[in-house]
Image (cartoon, grey):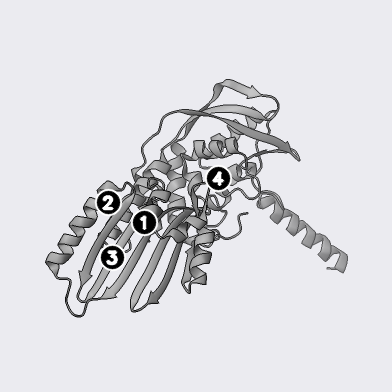
């Protein structure tokens, strides 16, 4: 076999392999669409059918849903692989229609949809976990994958809502915007609010001062802290806190929490170790009232922006005070 013939044979083999793999350099393609309305319907139909690789072609670079619909599991946020898989399986319950308002201009269309209310159920599961950890039930709140999974399992079908979608024709394909306020609403419409959890973070800050171990657990959506637990662990070698005293303190804490919406408190003792928990649901609690009452350190106030508590600012301040911290999950590149 001469050299030229070898090259021709090799090229033929490469061409055959490419065709077998559905096109060299190929991949999922958008179904042809003549309008934003038609493209949006194709996108939502892909989601209904579990065709996530194809649905991804409609998502703009930087859309956090790209971490939820990864090509290969374990690349984006390994800690949440099972949660994402559970969500993807259940979100196929989506139903939708083009709303009565229909299309507006060349890139807008109103969509009416019904989806499981994942956001409310996940938030409720988080609060249950917070209360459990404050009552001494291990790391229930710190186990964010656990309570997210429980929330998805508990989610019930929500009511129909109508939101505007923006689909822009770019380079022969449509991209559904996610950066604007109404775009955010559309992302939450078809995901049942799970879109808000696509950039979830749990920060754990620790240090020890005068023999007392301080641990803070911060749950955040993006940079906004939505809940936290402060855990203080100290020794009671002298046995000053007996069972009756612990019970009395828990009764007092329960009464205080009832008078302060969004507060969870508890104290437990294991051997000589005494652990006190204070949990705060910042979505319910009045942050300024907490600061003014002394329930929360005034240092939080400087980390607030538009009434929201910043995770990055809080962690930065804690780090300056000598605390160490970890933030998980660490999201990989969204492709």
Q: Give above or below for 40 relative to 84.
A: above
Query: Local crowd at mark 3 within 10 Å, few (<14), some, or many (≥20)?
Result: some
Q: SS class of the residue under badge 4? A: helix
Q: Could you say which is closer to the camera, residue 305 or residue 267?
A: 305
Name the spot of residue 228 as percent of width and height, x first: 39, 57
Name the spot of residue 53 as percent of width and height, x first: 58, 47
Disc 3 or 1, which lies upstream in sequence?
1
Q: In this image, 1 relative to 45: left or right?
A: right
The answer for how far apart the CA atoms under marks 1 and 2 are is 25 Å
Disc 1 or 2, which lies upstream in sequence?
1
Name the spot of residue 217 as percent of width and height, x first: 40, 62
Q: Which residue is mark 3?
A: 276
Q: In this image, 325 relative to 101: left or right?
A: left
Q: Give above or below for 198 relative to 162.
A: below
Q: Which residue is mark 1?
A: 146
The answer for how far apart the CA atoms under marks 2 and 4 are is 44 Å
Q: Could you say which is closer to the camera, residue 59 or residue 282?
A: 282
């Amino acid at each position: 076999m001469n050299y030229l013939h070898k090259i021709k044979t090799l090229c033929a083999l490469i061409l055959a392999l490419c065709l077998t793999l559905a096109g060299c350099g190929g991949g999922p393609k958008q179904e042809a669409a003549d309008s934003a309305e038609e493209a949006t319907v194709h996108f939502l139909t892909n989601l209904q059918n579990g065709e996530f690789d194809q649905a991804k072609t409609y998502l703009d670079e930087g859309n956090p849903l790209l971490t939820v619909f990864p090509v290969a599991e374990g690349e984006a946020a390994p800690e949440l692989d099972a949660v994402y898989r559970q969500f993807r399986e259940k979100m196929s319950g989506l139903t939708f229609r083009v709303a009565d308002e229909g299309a507006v201009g060349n890139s807008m269309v109103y969509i009416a949809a019904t989806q499981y209310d994942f956001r409310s159920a996940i938030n409720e599961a988080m609060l249950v976990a917070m209360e459990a950890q404050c009552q001494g039930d291990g790391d229930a709140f710190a186990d964010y994958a656990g309570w997210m999974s429980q929330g998805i399992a508990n989610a019930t079908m929500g009511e129909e809502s109508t939101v505007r979608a923006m689909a822009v024709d770019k380079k022969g394909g449509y991209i559904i915007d996610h950066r604007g306020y109404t775009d955010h609403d559309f992302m939450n419409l078809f995901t049942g609010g799970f879109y808000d959890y696509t950039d979830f973070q749990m920060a754990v800050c620790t240090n020890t001062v005068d023999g007392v171990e301080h641990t803070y657990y911060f749950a955040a959506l993006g940079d906004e802290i939505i809940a936290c637990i402060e855990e203080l662990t100290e020794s009671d070698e002298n046995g000053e806190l007996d069972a009756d005293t612990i019970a009395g303190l828990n009764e007092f804490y329960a009464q205080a929490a009832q008078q302060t919406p969004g507060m969870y408190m508890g104290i437990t003792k294991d051997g000589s170790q005494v652990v006190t928990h204070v949990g705060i649901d910042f979505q319910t609690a009045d942050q300024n009232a907490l600061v003014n009452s002394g329930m929360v350190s005034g240092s939080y106030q400087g980390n607030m922006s538009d009434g929201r508590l910043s995770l990055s600012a809080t962690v930065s301040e804690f780090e300056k005070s000598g605390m160490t911290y970890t933030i998980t999950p660490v999201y990989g590149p969204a492709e």
